[in-house]
Image (cartoon, helix red, strand yellow):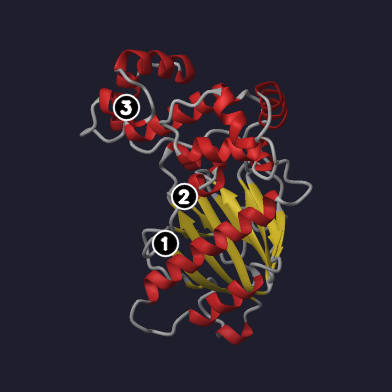
Amino acid sequence: MDVFDELLRGVRGRGAVFGRSVLCAPWSLRFTDGAYLTLCMPLRGAGWIVPEDGQPLRVEAGEAAVVRGPAPFIFTDDPADGTGPGRAGGVREVRWDQARDTGSASGGAPEFDCATVLLAAAYDVQEQLPQRLLRALPPAVVVPDEEDCSPLRDYLEAQLGRGRPGDQIVLDRLLDWMLVCTLRDWFDRPEANPPGWYGALGDEVAGPALRAMHEDPAHPWTTAELAGRAGVSRTTLAKRFTELVGDGPVAYLTEWRMTLAADLLTHPELTVAAVARRVGYADAFGFSAAFKRVRGESPSAFRREALASGPVEAAAPAG
């Protein structure tokens, strides 16, 4: 398992968190409820994504948009006129706790008269691990279907409304797959500016060290042992790893362990000592010191705040 796999492991579309909208101009949908990630795919026609903090982006059939939350955003046929209260027909609110099929945004026209059909899915991203992925994303991205994703889109559309047993779980997993496909294609694009660890995964020096740390983060890794995985000297590994990732191997491992620990601390049945052991610390004292150094507060304080406040909002994207 690599870091990209692990960051996406907890990101899932569930149950009634997706909808198919038949949109007849003039139309505007305002997505609320604070989803941490929203996937928008026009099955027919086109529209504009208007993030709360960002420039409008056009998305057409054959493309997918990923919008980073939890701020609301608007999907409209006209970004210059489609976001205000004076809009003809109004701006329709979309809430993910309502019916999964959002129907026609105009209500009057038959589906064959409507230019755009939108499929959208919302994703809960409450854990600390996938929050790292969110920080690498701008407010919204639009990605053309590449070779890997295009057949998946066609199959997904073919499954809609078939009424077969297990349809919900099939659609959920297809949408999960589509999200992963879209994000991977985005990070491979030249304009994406992906985080250092993403590029390092394919590096013949840094890649083996990264994968080793993610396969067994509790192991007492040393720079020398990690260098052995790559078949290079300690100096070569430290230099190359820092160039690509931004931190040395040991510093990266410590930060990654603290991210894992932050998620474990939200489970009240685990003691601080138990969390410490799971992330490679022999005692709670050493773990607590490292956690406070990296996260700015003690494990106990973090746990109290996390359990009191519920899901933590995604931070702004890294510069």
Question: In the drawing, does residue 36 fall left or right of residue 301?
Answer: right
- Tell which residue pokes out farthest to the left in this image: 269
**Is 198 in front, or is 163?**
198
Q: Nearer the viewer, residue 36 or 261?
A: 261
Q: Are marks 1 and 2 in contact (CB under 8 Å)?
A: yes
For label 1, the SS is loop
| Secondary element at tag 3 | helix
Q: Does 247 appear above or below 268?
A: above
Question: Where does label 1 land, which residue?
Answer: 17
Q: Position of residue 263 (x, y in %)?
A: 37, 35
Residue highlighted by disc 3: 277
Question: Which sits in the foreground, 252 or 236?
Answer: 236
- Whichever of labels 3 and 1 marks the residue nearer the N terminus, that label is 1
- Residue 31's place in the image compared with 70, above or below, is below
Which label is found at residue 51? none
Amino acid tagged 3? Arg
Residue at x-position 69% and y-position 58%: 143
